[in-house]
Amino acid sequence: MKPDCREASRFRDLVRGARSVRRFQESRPIPAEVLRKLVACARLVPSAANLQPLRYILCNDSLRRDSIFACLKWAGYLEDWSGPARGERPAAYLVILSDREITRDAWCDCGIAAQTITLYARTLGLGSCILGAIDREGLRRALDIAARFDVLLVIALGFAAETVVVTEVDAEQGVRYWRDADGIHHVPKRRVDELIVQEFVTH
């Protein structure tokens, strides 16, 4: 059986297109039904020992969005940019939690689920950004999150208001993402040959 190269190419394009978006069309709402679909997709992914400790907070309410936004830090490499302005902020968020009464180690589950959510969001025409720079205690207070839950990640969601392109890492720029004069966001990625340490393969 030969692999379906067209399907593989479509998936590669999906991954390439699912970049971190940091400026959104804030006025375009995301219905609760769409947020629930993202969680429904994430629940299907592998889980260590199949414990399934992840839990989610869904938010598209404007006041709660402001509370979440205040607990986030955006784009560390863009030192003169404090985050999206009003009108360009996310239209919705998913907060990923882990239930400590099930396990205290959900790092593997969290990464798999977050990536799956961003890929599925892309198929729905949405941009996303996985955020780990979080004032976790501030967010816990703002959303009244019970003590049994660890705050792992926040995924910002919305229709993109910027263009993000993948480039190759060069000696001058390194891995720091940057924006050009037209506001296009460039994300440098290392070359494949730089990533492979050893190969034990036959051709």
Image (tube, rainbow, N blue to C red):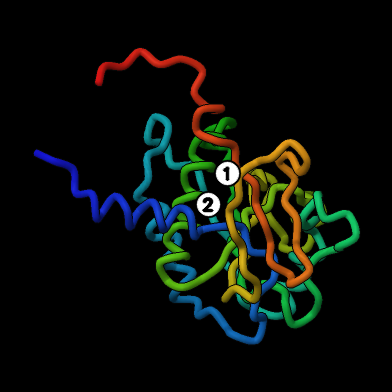
Helix, strand or loop under label 1:
strand
Question: x and y percent of residue 6 in the render?
Answer: 24, 55
Q: Residue furthest left?
A: 1
Count of numbered circles on the image:
2
**Which residue carries the number 1 mark?**
98
Question: x and y percent of residue 39 in the render?
Answer: 45, 60
Going 9% across and 38% down the picture, which residue do you hit? 1
Going 81% across and 65% down the picture, which residue do you hit? 83
Q: Which mark is residue 55?
A: 2
67 up-or-down from 115: above or below: below
Distance, label 1 to label 2, CA atoms, is: 6 Å
- The foreground one among 93 and 78 is 78
162 up-or-down from 15: above or below: below
Question: x and y percent of residue 80 in the render?
Answer: 90, 60
- The foreground one among 86 and 50 is 86
Residue 82 as seen in the image, left or right of residue 203: right
Q: Specify few, some or many for label 2: CA neighbours under 10 Å numbering under 14, 14-19, or 20 or more.
A: some
Helix, strand or loop under label 2:
strand
Q: Amino acid at mark 1?
A: Ser
